[in-house]
Image (spheres, rainbow, N blue to C red):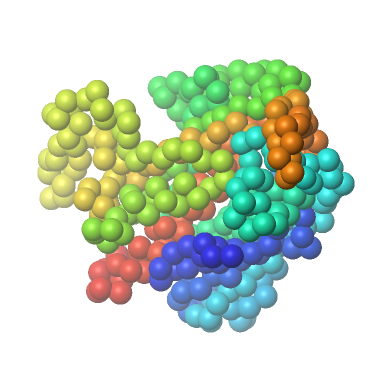
Amino acid sequence: MAGNSFGTLFRYTSWGESHGPAIGVVVDGVPPRIPLAEPDIQHWLDRRRPGQSRYTTQRREPDEVKILSGVFEGQTTGTPIQLMIDNVDQRSKDYRNIADRFRPGHADYTYWKKYGIRDYRGGGRASARETASRVAAGAVARKVLGSGISIRGALVQIGLHAIDREAWEWPAVEENPFWCPDRAMAVRWADYLDQVRKAGSSAGAVIEIVASGVPAGLGEPVYDKLDGDLARAMMTINAVKGVEIGAGFGAVPLSGEQNGDEIRMKDGKPVFLSNNAGGILGGISSGQDIVARFAVKPTSSIPKPMRTIDSEGHEVEIETHGRHDPCVGIRAVPVGEAMMAVVLADHLLRYRAIGGEV
């Protein structure tokens, strides 16, 4: 199946299905002699791992990664790095009732129309389980970027409930199960999602990813702009339906003088007075923080009866059983971080290829 690879110089290909024996990824283009071991990758996989709170799917996957190639004596060799993650907690029987029925909002119908066959067990290749492969690739990308570039993500809205940006505290993100930077809103989300879960429904979310320490000069105009590649990267994440960079759609009501990021000099260096552009001008990084947000739709798999059709064209009802996230956006935070890392690593290598110095 085409479309399983992402990137140019730093390039990864993910493989596997939700209920297959394993999932994994092949990462190519990693320079040699970069220190890399399984714990470097496991740290990030543990942040995405399911079953860590009642607000995510209760599927119990340890997500233990194995490095199969491309690393020797604790360093990358410059050859393809293959990573594998075993699936150990599949319950395929939960999906037998949808074997010939299409879940509304899911990829069941489109996969069936395109290929004439679909793996109905947990959504197969279309499952959010695939995102573990992305997080593993992102962990390798972070090693390529080095410690000077930090990438952090936060959940900024669930349903109609958005955070108070004046209350934003990065340490709070690690202190609650929602990656929420607003401590008071995290408490409200807990009550809200309890109600959503008990009602057998789901909620959407908005995630914000911020990369700091990114040097100016990354990005390849005109058709490989850094923000264009970031938008594509985020849109490939399961259930994502919208992406914005910097002020995004919020720039529409602003005037030109309000939206323009004015520049002054301080200590011999240019300083931007605002960051409505999200750290990218003309598709090239400006040296400011890179800010991207993406919208995740409500989880499509819910136990409430919904109208649909089956593979024979009959109008039927469907209830989706199994273990699902009441808000899939929660576990999308580390996935968004990973995709930011992958894009930046790719463009960093491309910048170095033309003689750019970081």
Relative depth, front residue between 23 and 292: 23
Number of marks in the rendered image: 0
Q: Residue at x 26, y 40 (%)?
A: 277
User: On screen, 335 above or below 206?
Assistant: below
Which residue is outermost to the front?
A: 313
Q: Can residue 117 be seen by looking at this rendering?
A: yes
The x, y position of residue 304, in whole percent, is: 75, 25
Q: Residue at x 71, y 40 (%)?
A: 313
Relative depth, front residue between 241 and 353: 241
The x, y position of residue 123, in whole percent, is: 70, 48
Relative depth, front residue between 236 and 148: 236
Left or right: 218 in relation to 24: left
The x, y position of residue 25, in whole percent, is: 61, 66
Q: Can residue 75 be seen by looking at this rendering?
A: no
Left or right: 91 in relation to 138: right
Left or right: 18 in relation to 204: right
The x, y position of residue 214, in whole percent, is: 34, 54
Query: Could you tell me which quadrant the N terminus lies in?
Result: bottom right
Left or right: 333 in relation to 166: right
Which residue is outermost to the right?
A: 93
Q: Quadrant of residue 327?
A: top right
Q: Residue at x 48, y 35 (%)?
A: 295
User: On screen, 71 above or below 304?
Assistant: below
Q: Residue at x 45, y 42 (%)?
A: 209
Query: Could you tell me which quadrant the C terminus lies in?
Result: bottom left
